[in-house]
Image: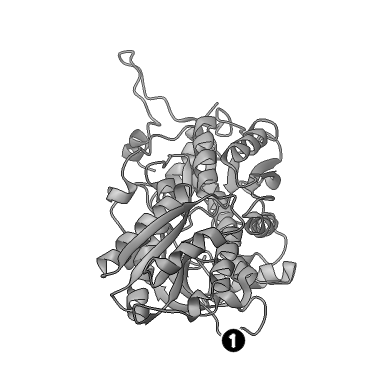
Amino acid sequence: MSFSNLTRRGLIKTSAVAGAGLALPTYLRADGHSGFTNAPTGSTVTLGFNVPQTGPYAEEGLDELRAQELAVQHLNGEGDGGMMNTFSSKALKGNGILGKKVEFVTGDTQTKSDAARASAKAMIEKDGAIMINGGSSSGVAVAVQGLCQEAGVIFMAGLTHSNDTTGKDKKANGFRHFFNGYMSAAALAPVLKNAYGSERRAYHLTADYTWGWTQQESIAAATEAMGWETVNNVLTPLASTDFSSYIAPVLNSGADVLVLNHYGGNMVNSLTNAIQFDLLNKEVNGKKFEIVVPLYSELMAAGAGKNVQGVIGSMNWNWQLQDEGSKAFVKSFGEKYGRPPSNSAHTCYVQTLLYADACERAGTFNPCGVVEALEDFEFDGLGNGPVLYRGDDHQCFKDVLVMKGKENPSNEYDTLEIVEVTPRAQVEYAPDHPMFAGGELGKCNPGA
């Protein structure tokens, strides 16, 4: 850890008194486990897992909890170790984190920002959680990330796909492993052009919150750049369960593609409604009508059943990947739960390991040491090929998957097939890209 890096993060300050020496940051002193929020003093350390246990994304939240529990078991030396065996960093030893046994508490975000902040606040203040992980909504992620910045703990985001999480709302104490709307669009556009042509008219239905807005902006920009026209964009409330009234106008719009910027139960319901209107059997503008789901998950696909057949979308990770890390995780998860993991489960599992590994490499739980260890950290062995945690915005960059609903699934989990593994270079962007402009990363807050 260089002196220049410490100065950049605001961790070393020169005394105003003439002749005074430099004050070492807390996490470089011999008492490196004090002076920051919830510094563990006993033989255990507590992590907070904040996921939707109720609401439209509850199914994703349940799978995140499964993965988080599995990660804790592996960190404590229980089970087969999973991805700890394939992770390029070898700092984790299966003896907890820095020799302390890992414990965890859980909270229900309800897929609501206020509820998510309240549950995270309780875990930090009442349960002593030193890190918060989870979430299946970008509105929740942005809210909890802000809270963790104020409280002086690390936020390892779960499933959050809005550009804003590591764009205008980025925070020094927050890190995102999951990809974002821009990356989905960059991966999807060439595949969509090849599959459906460059002269298409798209009608968008968009979840009315930060994820939907930035996902729609991203996919519209990418498809318009290849020749598509955006006919309309209609915002839909997150609490919607019946989208029939939103689907009907599509029939008279002149559009020949419906883009569903929906996730979780919203996507299952809107796609089901679209199929009930027989959209995929219609011909418009001399072309077969198509539906696109920019952000897919296995759980959504299973919920939508045969309605996803042939529908193209993108994913952060999929259990069918054949790299050693993915196979190790699928094996561990499958043996424990009797089913393959979702990509939301994967990202929460990986984020938990990455936090623990950063503590080990930094030699401290101090959040500023963790930040320093994660910034510009390059690693492999956790799925998606070589990965970079960029220091400028705390966004992970890795390969992105383009998926399609399988025509002849063999079982309830075999609903999607990988169409293309988009290389990391194709989805990278500059830190000052207009879609990510505004806001400041700021400095790490160690809290107490």
User: Residue at horizontal 50%, vertical 64%?
Assistant: 248
Q: Percent x, y for residue 45?
A: 67, 42
Amino acid carrying label 1: it is Asn
Which element type, helix, strand or loop, lies under badge 1?
loop
Residue in the foreground of this view, choosing between 56 and 291: 291
- Judging depth in this view, the residue of 403 and 391 nearest the camera is 403
Q: Which colour scheme is used?
A: one colour
- Count the labels in the image: 1
Task: From this view, report whether residue 409 is shown above or below residue 53.
Answer: below
Would you say 386 lies left or right of 60 here?
A: left
Left or right for 172, reference 97: left
Res 54 seen here: yes
Q: Where is residue 360 in the image (x, y as percent from the top left)?
A: 55, 48
Which residue corresponds to the image point at 37% horizontal and 62% vertical from the top-left? 219
Label 1 belongs to which residue? 408
Determine the image quadrant of residue 302.
bottom right
Quadrant holding the C terminus: top right
Residue 362 place in picture, x, y as percent: 49, 45
Q: Which residue is drawn at 67% across and 69% down?
A: 332
Q: Hey, which quadrant is residue 170 in on the image?
A: top left
Residue 377 in sight: no
Q: Where is residue 144 in the image (x, y as percent from the top left)?
A: 54, 40
